[in-house]
Image (tube, rainbow, N blue to C red):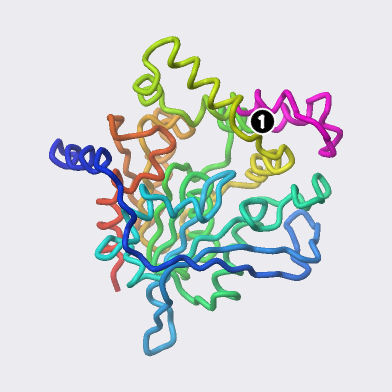
Amino acid sequence: MSPIVLAALLLSLAAPLAAADYPAPTEGDYLVTDFHFTTGETLPRLNLHYTTLGTPVKNASGVVTNAVLIMHGTGGSGRAFLSPTFAGQLFGAGQLLDATRYFIILPDDIGHGKSSKPSDGLHMKFPHYTYTDMVHGEYRVVAEKLGVNHLRLVMGTSMGAMHTWIWGTMYADFMDALMPLASAPVEIGGRNRMLRKMIVDSIKRDPNWNNGEYTGPLANLVAANFALFMMTSSPLQLLKQAPTRAQADALFERRFYLGAAADANDMLYHFDSSRDYNPQPDLEKIQAPLFAVNSADDQVNPPELGILEREIKRVKRGRYILIPTSDATRGHGTHSLPAIWGEYLAELLKDSEK
């Protein structure tokens, strides 16, 4: 990244973020009966929630030409993308994904947001969904509920980035372009898998867990959040936020003890669901241009592993982009800052024009 571009990005990040001028979001639900999971389990009624902006446009052949699917990260929801730092940089008039021109689809994945999840009441009796199930759910919202038969762009952050790779292999002719942000297209192993085991096992081994039917706070939920924090935080940004012992202690207290605790059943399922993820054997199936964007300070996907340099060669129209660590990057969280990677999105949209 050139010094001029970096300076512009820093200026953009430092400037006050006013609400972007884009169409009001619309929320909806798709109730699927007898949803079959890859585990063999079935849910009689699965609710899939979503948020949309804009209106779909079809060409003379009846193909939707302007739909954009954006998928959230672990524990998130589609509405998280309506922040000033994301929607405010992308969805406004004249911006890259101007919602007066594009039809933006923001699903809440199975187990997340306002979609059906263990905390609704079934707890550990909820079907043990996988990433493949989640992508099937996304597809059904897009194709069945919203009637979209083609996507201009598929993109996602973290877990949503991994889903982007799956979309490229599972529905290869359904999109014009793909942009996974903060991911690797291989089975989750090594430290990443161990992190997920730390979270799942911390919850399961809590003395009050009671196989998900706990009635009071779980002490081990703090340990699970410790593990997650160490993987997804940015050392540079944390030092800037809390350069002294007293400031670091105060920030730690706010982060781990003063906020609302997550539902332990939902959290366990969030991190266990990645167990089937592995698009690696099918990377040659990806047809559309794909820009894989990671940041050098991402501890979840550290560049020294060399995974993307190796695997991107198997993607016919693939490109790997590594954003250097800077005052603008936020570790794993860089995935949600289009002010940093927007220039690559612009290039991808141009390269995939038809």
Q: Is 327 placed above or below 350 here?
A: above
211 in the magenta segment = yes
The residue where tag 1 is placed is 199
Residue at the spot 44% in from the left edge and 10% down from the top edge: 245
Q: Is residue 168 visible?
A: yes
| Quadrant assignment for the C terminus | bottom left
Q: Amino acid at mark 1?
A: Ile
Residue at the spot 58% in from the left edge and 38% down from the top edge: 188
| Residue neighbourhood size for the residue with mark 1, other residues' Cα within 10 Å, grouped as few (<14), some (14–19), many (≥20) | many
Residue 219 pos. (x, y %):
73, 23
Residue at the spot 23% in from the left edge and 37% down from the top edge: 10
Residue 118 pos. (x, y %):
75, 49
Q: Is residue 282 visible?
A: no
Residue 60 pos. (x, y %):
37, 89
241 in the magenta segment = no
Nearer to us in this view, 214 or 285: 214
In the shown orientation, is residue 53 left or right of residue 7?
A: right
Nearer to us in this view, 347 or 252: 252
Q: Is 212 placed above or below 227 here?
A: below
Nearer to us in this view, 100 or 354: 100
Locate residue 302: give its quadrant: top left
Magenta extent: 198-225
Q: Residue furthest bottom?
A: 60
Residue 323 pos. (x, y %):
30, 38
Circle 1 sits in a helix, a strand or a loop, which is it? helix
